[in-house]
Amino acid sequence: MPYVYNAQERRYRDTQTGRYVSAARVREAARQIVETGNSQADALTDLLVSGQLSPEDWSVEFRETLKRRAVSNYMLGRGGRNAMQASDYGRVGAYLRQQYKLVDGFLADIRAGGLSEAQIRARSRQYFNATRTLYERGNAAAYGLANVLPAYPGQQPCTTDCCAGCQCYWDIQPANLGNPDEEDWDCYWRLGLAEHCPQCERRSVAWSPLKVRGGKVQPYRRAGLFRED
């Protein structure tokens, strides 16, 4: 993308037109990163089932591809490579360590020979679909909310029935309370273009907005917003 990030405005600007890029367009770029990962995962599945890759070699390539897509989506939300700090790489690293443990189980199932090609393909895509949550986490970090928001679309372990397939997103807006020394935010859980699970539907009402004042989430009714409730 021929875009540069304005950290003060927390928006991308098109260097060719000089105009700001809409949030919807940036989210579409995140979706494209996911789809690129899915295409690459499909290609790895083809090599695996044809015998051109051993399960062990497939695992190495799968992990590296997953890492690239995960980092790309977080960076997109965060504001690009130049905005990344050590804490940001730490969040991505923690996410990947969790995912790699799951890949170990996936590899064991492939070695056992109990998965069909279709099952391998579908399961592979789940990992890349889940990387969109890193765009959301990166975007939250750009607002100083990385450790503040109570949940993220598509996060794992799953907190909604839709899990990694979640198409919702956070819409973070300044609260405009007239205090320039405090970064107060109104955070809206928006429903994406998909069939929605009960938890996401309730979040779109309960967190409309979720109020963050002085870096702290204001009290809200939790009942029904999380799958474990």
Image: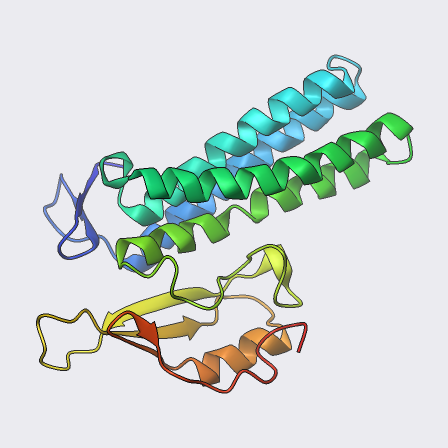
Q: Quadrant of residue 43?
A: top right
Residue 218 position, x and y percent, is 36, 81
State which quarter of the image contains the C terminus: bottom right
Residue at image position (57%, 47%) is: 129
Residue 63 position, x and y percent, is 60, 28
Residue 73 position, x and y percent, is 42, 43
Residue 68 position, x and y percent, is 47, 30
Residue 100 appears left or right of 107:
left
Q: Quadrant of residue 44?
A: top right
Say if 32 sits above or below 49 in the image. Answer: below
Residue at image position (63%, 35%) is: 100
Q: How is the image coloured?
A: rainbow
Front residue (pair 42, 114): 114
Say if 75 sits above or below 201 in the image. Answer: above
Residue 173 appears left or right of 55:
left
Front residue (pair 31, 62): 62
Q: Quadrant of residue 154?
A: bottom right
Residue at image position (60%, 70%) is: 195
State which quarter of the image contains the N terminus: top left
How many numbered marks are there? 0
Residue at image position (52%, 46%) is: 131
